[in-house]
Amino acid sequence: MAVGFAILCNTLWGSAFPFIKLGYRLFAIDAADTASILCFAGARFAIASVWVFLGSCLLQKRPPAFPRGRVLAECCALGLWQTTFHYGIYYFAVALLTGAFGGILNCTQSFLGVILAHFLYGKADRLTPAKALGCALGFGGVLVATLGNHGGGSALGVACMMTATVMFAVSGPWNKAVTQKADSFAACCVNLGLGGAVLFLAGLALGGRLSPEGPLAFGVLLYLSCVSGAAYLLWALLMKNNPVSRISVFALVNPVVNVLLSAVLNGEPLFDWRYLAALALVCAGIWMVNRPAKEAAG
């Protein structure tokens, strides 16, 4: 079940990148219009918090049990880190990169999560030689994707995407710690609601606006908000109940879906040799990290 949900989460997240780029076109947002980018991101996450609230009412038969005091403050801090700052940088990177290239760069978060878990949890989630080799293969895939890739985006876009992946990797263990103390639905509501509201208000303050060019624009925004609500909640539950390294590494699915949908929705090249080689290396890295350990002889 954990494997299935981890794959589902990353399938949803993988579809987000090309849909965000499609949303920029449908809302007439230019890559240089940072203020409107923040408004678009903020609206998505604020709406997503409503979906999480409704999901709690449906699945738990009650509204989320929101924490108080110190735990609430920690949920708010996580929301500012994971949603406001992380996604503010991430959305800016999306505007500067092609969907396929950005998706492959973004998958490094899975390997960073494996490395970080070793230092945080020690023997409970240690970095074995097989995991280390898997991480090396995964990072090798990212290097192949970036070699000579002048059509994939700017250096600033690469820097922003790599910064966003590090921030997301750090948020995984933090999310695990928070959901041990607070209801997962409530933690996700606060994370997405507060983080999204701050993004949206910051965009408005900077002069941003949303100018939909038709009904399809609202459909894309609603889809992205559903992706956020469902995937964030599932991810929080997975992080709460499983070793971080075993779950985070399933981000393999993310770039695969990303490359396919970027080609379908945005007309990006599907059979670029760098992307195919990078995906092969990342797949090999995922397999190395997750392959069953050999049982001791005798």
Image (spheres, rainbow, N blue to C red):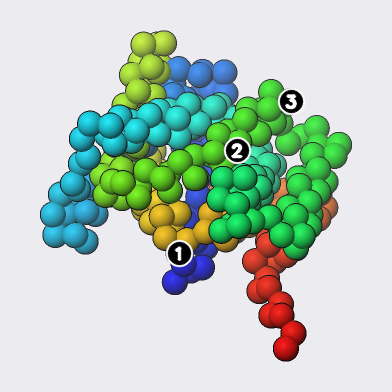
Label 1 residue SS: helix
Tags 2 and 1 touching, CB below 8 Å: no
Residue at image point 76% right, 47% down: 139
Q: Give the residue number, with chain letter if any, for mark 1.
A: 5
Going from N to C along the chain, the mark reached first, 1 or 3, is 1
Cα distance in 3D space between marks 2 and 1: 21 Å
Q: Quadrant of residue 134?
A: bottom right
Which residue appears farthest toward the right when viewing the image?
148
Res. 141 in view: no
Closest to the observer, 261 or 141: 141
Residue positioned most to the top: 206
Give coordinates of residue 161: x percent, y percent: 63, 33
Disc 3 is placed on an element classified as: helix
Image coords of residue 108 (percent x, y): 66, 45
User: What kind of residue is marked 1?
Assistant: Phe
**For this view, does 12 lie left or right of residue 138?**
left
Q: Is residue 296 visible?
A: yes
Which of marks 2 and 3 precedes in the sequence? 3
Q: CA distance from mark 1 to mark 3?
A: 34 Å
Of discs 1 and 3, which sits in the foreground?
1
Which label belongs to residue 165? 2
Q: 139 or 93: which is nearer to us?
A: 139
Q: Residue at x 39, y 24 (%)?
A: 199
Residue type, numbered disc 2:
Thr
Q: Is residue 170 left or right of residue 191?
A: right
Front position among marks 3 and 2 = 2
Q: Quadrant of residue 154?
A: top right
Mark seen at residue 155: 3
Q: Is residue 74 above or below residue 266?
A: above
Query: Which image quarter holds the C terminus?
Result: bottom right
Mark 3 to mark 2: distance in Å? 15 Å
* Residue at the image position 64 percent from the left and 56 percent from the top: 126
